[in-house]
Amino acid sequence: MSPLDAFFDEKPEPLKGCMLALKDIILAMDDRVVIGWKYNTGFFSFMDRMMCYFGHHAVTGQLYIGFTEGHKMHHTALMSEGRKRVKVYYINPEEDIRKIELEEIVKEAISMYH
C-alpha cells in the first residue's frame, strides 16, 4: 500500500469518508489536478505546481484544506489566521460537504495558475 493510500485508510470514519469525498471533488475539477504524497499528507498539484493539501489544526484537530497561494485568493470562506501565504478552508466531517463552495474555491485556485 502506498503512503498516500495508507494516509486515507488509517483515518477513522467519518473523517475517512469525508476526505475521500473531498479528494474526488477536487480531482474532478480539472484533468490536470493530481494528488500525490508530499510533506506527510495528500497534496494536490495543478500542472506540477502545488495547489492545496489536507491538514489538521494543531490545537483543535479540525480538518482543513490549505491553499498554497491563498494570500492571492479572496473567497470569504478562506481564513489566513495569521499565516502569510496559506489560507485554509475548514471542513467538519460530521456535516455535509459544501460542494458548491468548495468548487468555487478550487476554481479560484486553478485560475491563478493560468
Image (cartoon, rainbow, N blue to C red):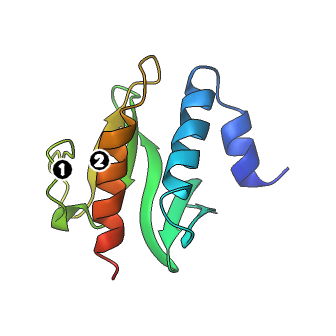
The span from disc 2 to disc 1 (Cα, nearest Å) is 6 Å
Residue 2, placed above or below residue 46: above
Quarter of the picture holding the C terminus: bottom left
Q: Residue at x 21, y 46 (%)?
A: 78
State the image coordinates of residue 18 (x, y, percent, origin top left). 54, 30
Amino acid carrying label 1: it is: Ser
Judging by the rendered image, the residue that carries numbered circle 1 is 80
23 left or right, relative to 74: right
Q: Residue at x 36, y 57 (%)?
A: 106
Residue 82, placed above or below residue 29: above
Q: Secondary structure at mark 2?
A: strand
Residue placed furthest toward the top = 94
Amino acid carrying label 2: it is: Val
Residue 16 image-quadrant placement: top right
Judging by the rendered image, the residue that carries numbered circle 2 is 88
Residue 105, placed above or below residue 6: below
State the image coordinates of residue 17 (x, y, percent, origin top left). 61, 29
State the image coordinates of residue 3 (x, y, percent, origin top left). 74, 53
In terms of sequence position, does the residue under pointer 2 or pointer 1 come before the other? Answer: 1
Q: Secondary structure at mark 1?
A: loop
The foreground one among 11 and 102 is 102
Is the residue marked by circle 2 packed among few (<14), some (14-19), or many (20+) residues within 10 Å?
many
Q: Residue at x 49, y 53 (%)?
A: 26
Question: Mark 2 touching mark 1, by CB under 8 A?
Answer: yes
31 left or right, relative to 79: right
Is the residue marked by circle 1 packed among few (<14), some (14-19), or many (20+) residues within 10 Å?
some
Residue 28 image-quadrant placement: bottom right
The foreground one among 40 and 111 is 111
The foreground one among 25 and 6 is 25
Residue 81 in sight:
yes
